[in-house]
């Protein structure tokens, strides 16, 4: 189904082209909830005509019969008010459409790189944004028809593994496995680090172990694989607890690209892009300079013969384009890595490994802050573990549910509390512009009022309760949308805008465009709920309002699911 926005924009473009080719109109929702068109100012200036006169010229060529009523407003805006007949047609079409007006695109492939924790370390709040934002984008892309290849580019290689393997050997496999299997990765890592810093003999053994690992020693590789497997199993538990769609098959670590790194260097040299600088092999992509205006290098191979992150990222791009046939590459990584990725992408383009036809984006995000607006940590100054965060949120949700009048078993209450906790944590992240920092406030996030995940879940549950209380049957196919009340019309306008919200979130890679839409929809629902009785209304208003409730519930449920949030039937 073509979205309302696209219908209006297409008609507007035709009118603008008829008046003067080359000017694109700007279309946005107005304060009244319909639409307002601009672009006339620029068109009028270029022609030396008063804006209102130019608006009248555009209006003379604008055919919106049966779609919207148009008037010239202000200095030269076109205000478009959707007609009742158009709204009725749209809403009835949505009732029979499982996708609620969102088209499925021709199959394309998107590789989305997100989460990326480190082996032998527990996932903490620093991994929250990448995991939640990346998973929301993966869900949206899948819904739009993309073949999504998720990639968690875990840190599973490098010098730290020498000390980790030696620590494993010192403990003995049985003891080490027991510690790792209960998820005490941080304790294992800290103990290895203490020994590495205090014991010269252990430090030398660790260095030798790194050499053996990189040289392919079978026993060392076997011990390394134990660390990787236990860590990946732990990551899977965290993802399951958060209801994140990443699987163990999506974990592709740095080690996967080792055999490709020599070819990266060879091919960059053959392309004439590689330069030796200070003993290291570098590429100087055009347009990147340091503070002194000197060319900035991307180090591909260090002077100690080791490979850095740049080489691995370049190898990953080649693999994802050549073997996974990606049409889009998305990297959901923190904002401090922006220059690194800009340089990697520039080098990949210069080497012709990244065709112009492939969209490649660094989906940057800000930090999670504590109430003091500093990096979020525990009171003792330690990094907050993700699993502990979810446990605390679940406990608070359970306490809130216990104060409400619910006939739920303890098992049902725990399940609902978990759904609410996930919603609180995910929505707090996804409702913010990802490029900005935000303050983590669990008390506010878990609330059933305000711009929160639980508020949207409650809005859905409230709608489902209407149908549970309905004794008389109703036929959705019999609904006719007269929309006589302002609250009905406001809700209807929001419902038909769902495809625009999904498109905007996907096009801009900003999930908050969808979460903001859902919050606005829930607010309009509250106004409608208070102003328009449903079950006690006489026909045909009863059926019309039940249909509006059904569409709103389905929209909330689908929209929340695209953000990775469940919509309980009751709360």
Image: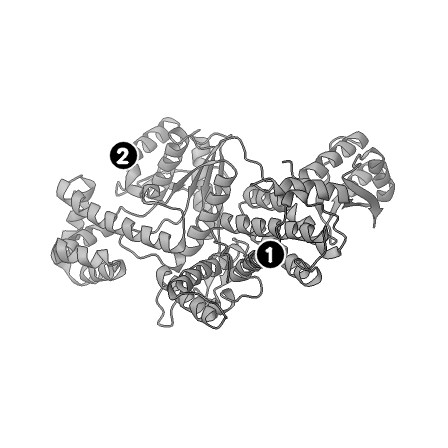
Please say if the residues under marks 1 and 2 sit with CB atoms less than 8 Å apart: no
Q: How far is the residue under mark 1 from the one under mark 2?
A: 67 Å
Name the residue at 84% across, 45% down: 72
Q: Residue 546, position in %: x, y?
A: 64, 52
Tally of numbered discs: 2
Comparing 82 with 174, the one in front is 82
Using the image as rendered, state which of residue 470 and residue 241 is in the foreground: 470
Counting from the top left corner in percent of width and height, residue 419 is at 44, 58
Mark 1, Cα crowd under 10 Å, few <14 / some 14-19 / many 20+, is few
Task: Tell us which disc is closer to us: 1 or 2.
Answer: 1
Instruction: Name the mark on residue 12.
Output: none
- Can you identify the residue that label 2 sits on? 259
- The image position of residue 362, as x and y in percent, is 47, 44
List the residue tagged with mark 1. Answer: 471
Image-based side of 163 in relation to 387, left or right: left
Between 253 and 512, which is closer to the camera in this rendering? 512
Q: From where the camera sits, is residue 285 visible? A: no
Classify 408 as above or below 244.
Answer: below
């Amino acid at each position: 189904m073509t979205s309302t926005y696209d219908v209006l924009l297409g008609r507007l473009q035709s009118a603008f082209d008829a008046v003067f080719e080359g000017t694109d109109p700007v279309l946005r929702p107005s304060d009244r909830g319909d639409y307002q068109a601009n672009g006339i100012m620029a068109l009028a200036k270029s022609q030396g005509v008063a804006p209102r006169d130019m608006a009248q010229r555009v209006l003379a060529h604008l055919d919106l019969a049966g779609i919207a009523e148009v008037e010239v407003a202000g200095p030269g805006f076109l205000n478009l008010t959707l007609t009742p007949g158009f709204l009725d047609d749209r809403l009835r079409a949505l009732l029979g459409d499982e996708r609620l007006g969102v088209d499925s695109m021709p199959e394309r492939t998107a590789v989305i790189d997100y989460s990326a924790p480190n082996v032998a370390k527990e996932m903490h709040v620093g991994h929250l944004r990448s995991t939640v934002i990346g998973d929301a984008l993966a869900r949206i892309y899948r819904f739009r028809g993309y073949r999504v290849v998720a990639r968690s580019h875990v840190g599973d290689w490098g010098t730290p593994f020498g000390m980790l393997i030696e620590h494993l050997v010192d403990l003995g496999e049985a003891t080490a496995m027991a510690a790792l299997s209960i998820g005490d990765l941080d304790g294992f890592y800290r103990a290895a680090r203490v020994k590495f810093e205090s014991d010269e003999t252990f430090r030398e053994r660790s260095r030798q172990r790194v050499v053996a690992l990189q040289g392919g020693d079978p026993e060392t590789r076997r011990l390394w694989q134990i660390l990787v497997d236990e860590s990946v199993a732990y990551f899977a538990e965290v993802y399951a607890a958060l209801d994140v769609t990443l699987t163990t098959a999506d974990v592709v670590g740095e080690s996967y690209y080792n055999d490709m790194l020599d070819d990266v260097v060879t091919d960059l040299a053959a392309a004439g892009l590689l330069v030796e600088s200070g003993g290291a092999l570098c590429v100087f992509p055009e347009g990147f300079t340091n503070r002194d205006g000197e060319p900035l290098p991307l180090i591909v191979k260090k002077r100690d013969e080791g490979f850095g992150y740049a080489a691995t990222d370049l190898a990953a791009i080649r693999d994802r384009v050549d073997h996974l046939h990606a049409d889009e590459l998305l990297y959901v990584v923190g904002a401090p890595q922006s220059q690194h990725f800009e340089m990697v992408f520039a080098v990949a383009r210069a080497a012709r490994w990244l065709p112009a036809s492939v969209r490649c984006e660094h989906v940057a995000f800000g930090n999670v802050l504590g109430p003091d607006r500093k990096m979020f940590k525990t009171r003792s100054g330690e990094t907050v573990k993700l699993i502990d965060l979810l446990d605390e949120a679940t406990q608070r949700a359970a306490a809130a549910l216990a104060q409400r009048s619910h006939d739920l078993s303890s098992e049902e209450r725990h399940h609902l509390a978990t759904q609410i906790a996930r919603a609180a944590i995910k929505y707090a992240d996804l409702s913010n512009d990802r490029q900005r920092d935000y303050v983590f406030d669990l008390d506010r996030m878990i609330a059933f009022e305000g711009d929160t995940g639980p508020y949207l879940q409650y809005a859905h549950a409230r709608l489902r309760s209407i149908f549970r209380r309905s004794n008389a049957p109703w036929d959705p196919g019999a609904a006719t949308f007269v929309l006589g009340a302002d609250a009905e019309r406001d809700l209807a306008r929001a419902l038909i805008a769902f495809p625009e919200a999904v498109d905007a979130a996907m096009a801009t890679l900003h999930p908050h465009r969808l979460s903001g839409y859902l919050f606005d929809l829930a607010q309009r629902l509250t106004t409608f709920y208070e102003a328009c009785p449903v079950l006690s209304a006489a026909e045909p208003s009863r059926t019309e309002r039940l249909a509006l409730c059904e569409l709103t519930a389905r929209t909330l449920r689908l929209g929340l699911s695209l953000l990775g949030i469940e919509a309980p039937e009751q709360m």
